[in-house]
Image: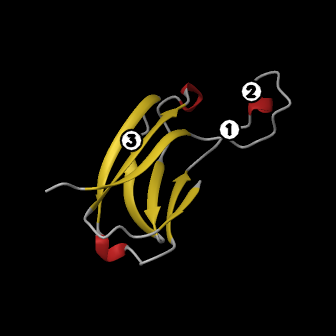
Amino acid sequence: GQILFDKLNKPTELIIKGKIPEIFKNELNASLYLNGKKLEQLEGQSGEFQNSFPIDTSLLKPKGNLLSIRLDRTFTPSEIWKSHDQRKLGIQIKKVQLSPINK
């Protein structure tokens, strides 16, 4: 998945909340990239997660910053369950928030 955002004028924190499906059996590698540079590695434990990371403002452009999540594998529901769902799925993202860091 990808998100475009503009630079905040203050030090910024990224908060990401979601769920890694049990189908991955704790063996999923997920990485966050900001404008093509690796920002963080998300732990591959199945279940709910919430992580927060400070963002290095030197990596940010004034407009059009690209945050992307890359997974080392996905699954197709129709290959696992009785389903017509042919989508390639990975982690469920419930919230992505950019917040100024209060110092």
Residue tagged 3: 43
In the rendered view, tell whether residue 73 sits above or below residue 48. below
**Earlier-in-chain disc, 2 versus 1:** 1
Task: Name the residue located 48 percent from the left edge and 48 percent from the top edge.
Answer: 30
Q: Is residue 96 left or right of residue 72?
A: left
Depth check: 53 or 86 in front?
53
Quote the CA–CA distance across marks 1 and 3. 18 Å
Q: Position of residue 71 (x, y in %)?
A: 55, 50
Which class describes the residues within 10 Å of circle 1: few (<14), some (14-19), or many (20+)?
some
Residue reaching furthest to the top: 82
Q: Position of residue 9 (x, y in %)?
A: 30, 70
Task: Name the residue located 30 percent from the left edge and 76 percent from the top edge.
Answer: 58
Depth check: 65 or 82 in front?
65
* Helix, strand or loop status at disc 3: loop
Q: Based on the displayed image, in which of its 4 quarters is residue 56 positioned?
A: bottom left
Tags 3 and 2 touching, CB below 8 Å: no
Name the residue type under label 1. Phe
Task: Name the residue located 54 percent from the left edge and 55 percent from the top edge.
Answer: 70
Tags 1 and 3 touching, CB below 8 Å: no
Tags 2 and 1 touching, CB below 8 Å: yes
* Helix, strand or loop status at disc 2: helix
Quote the CA–CA distance across marks 2 and 1. 8 Å
Q: Is residue 42 left or right of residue 90?
A: left
Quadrant that contains the C terminus = bottom left
Q: Position of residue 57 (x, y in %)?
A: 30, 71
* Helix, strand or loop status at disc 1: loop
Name the residue type under label 2. Ile
Q: Position of residue 78 (x, y in %)?
A: 80, 31
Which class describes the residues within 10 Å of circle 2: few (<14), some (14-19), or many (20+)?
few
Residue tagged 2: 80
Residue tagged 1: 75
